[in-house]
Image (cartoon, grey):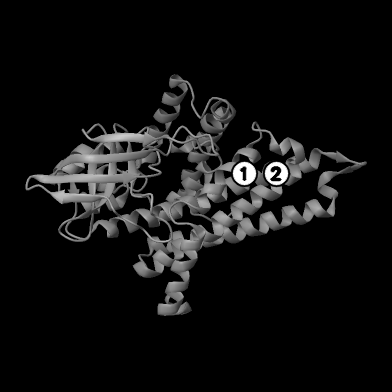
Amino acid sequence: MQLEHSEQTRTWQQAVRAYVDTLLIPNEVEAELNGGELPASTMRKIQDAAMALGLPGMDAPSGQGGLGKSMVDQVAAWEVLGRATNALCWCFPEAQSWMYEACGDSDYQLENYIRPLLEGRRREAYAITEAESGSHEVINTTARSTGQGYRIDGEKWFVTSGNLADFFFLQARTDEGGDALFLVDKDSPGIEMVDNPLFSHTFPSHHPTYRFSNVEVPGRNRIGGPGSGMDYSRSWFRHERMTISARMLGAAERMIEEATEWARQRDIQGEKLIDKQAIQFMLADCATELWAARLMVYEAAAAHDNQEDLKKLHTRCSMVKLYATEMANRVADRCLQIWGGRGYRRDNAVERFFREVRVDRIWEGSSEIQRMIIAGALKKRGLEGM
């Protein structure tokens, strides 16, 4: 049940799949049973292989040293990366194309922040969400002009990978009006991690809360012009929603494969479990929904490559994230049920996926937010404009 990709896309996806099968999946259980952590030597081997493949530069322009991959190729990579649990596929930084657009007029920003991401020398985290954030983005963090730069005050929640990062992409409200993005070094005076809660999943990447108190940021660390912060944040959201959706395809595929193989082997009252009609119905629904999601995700990826209208792309990203994340959660529930008590063990990939894919319906815009975006586009432009 595969799409007809070009030979280039197939070759690329197979290379990434080999990386996942040989370096990520074999280390999942050890990571799960050790708080998400792997030995330093193992992690270095995994990261070096990611660098050799060029994974940090999938979206970076080829003229800047990246791979300049199409969105279809990027989705193909993230689909197979999504087959691994415990966020082991997050072992590399990402130099995304929007960063070069946003920082293109600043050699300083490119040399000190973006190029080091591409080369794996630095790690980034996004400090956007705040305690009051919910149905709509709320930015109460302030960046007051000092003449030479800005003084940042506020608190950021759920800063994913903050514990591993060297710097933040931080969104703040300026006294000039509007939001702006800033590059903020994590070791700057006035930055304090005030909470690092445990979550349902077992990831090496944590989601801490940081407080920023009178943090001095040079003017050259501001990204773009007045009021451009949310534009770049939306670019990041579109990218993240596409890659999250792609990961859900890989997660669902692996769960279906493992549940099917288990059902083939499991004897129940003289029959194989897979011959029970109730099990057949669950597997059939899983396979059908995965196929539908795969078609949606790759169509949206192709639309990006064809440079379709930005408003349409924004809506499609919401559609695919909504459907793919909801699909993966339904698949996880059914597949765990098929495994029965064995499916509830932490050394079972389905159990880990059951916990891990739940958050994908929340972060980078909850399912409810995606529905609001989709309905808003329908109201403004109708079906033809989506």
**Considering only vertical position in the picture, is 68 above or below 26?**
below
Q: Can residue 294 be seen by looking at this rendering?
A: no
Q: Does the CB distance between marks 2 and 1 fall below 8 Å?
A: yes
User: Going by the image, does 286 lie left or right of 358?
Assistant: right
User: Going by the image, does 75 lie left or right of 113?
Assistant: right
Q: Mark 2: which secondary structure?
A: helix
Residue occupying the point 70% across, 58% down: 285
Residue 354 numbered tag: 1
| Picture quadrant where residue 41 is located | top left
Q: What residue type is labelled 2?
A: Leu
Residue beneath disc 2: 336
The image position of residue 182, as x and y in percent, is 22, 47
Residue occupying the point 50% across, 60% down: 320
| Picture quadrant where residue 376 is located | bottom left
The image position of residue 218, as x and y in percent, is 13, 42
Q: Which amino acid does label 1 sit on?
A: Phe
The front one of 297 and 102 is 102
Number of residues whose C-alpha sits closer than 10 Å to that of mark 2, classed few (under 14), some (14–19) or many (20 or more): many
State the quadrant of the C terminus: bottom left
The image position of residue 327, as x and y in percent, is 60, 56
User: Going by the image, does 238 lie left or right of 192?
Assistant: right
The front one of 365 and 124 is 365
Residue occupying the point 35% across, 53% down: 236
Q: Disc 2 to disc 1, how far (Cα)?
A: 8 Å
Q: Can residue 187 be seen by looking at this rendering?
A: yes
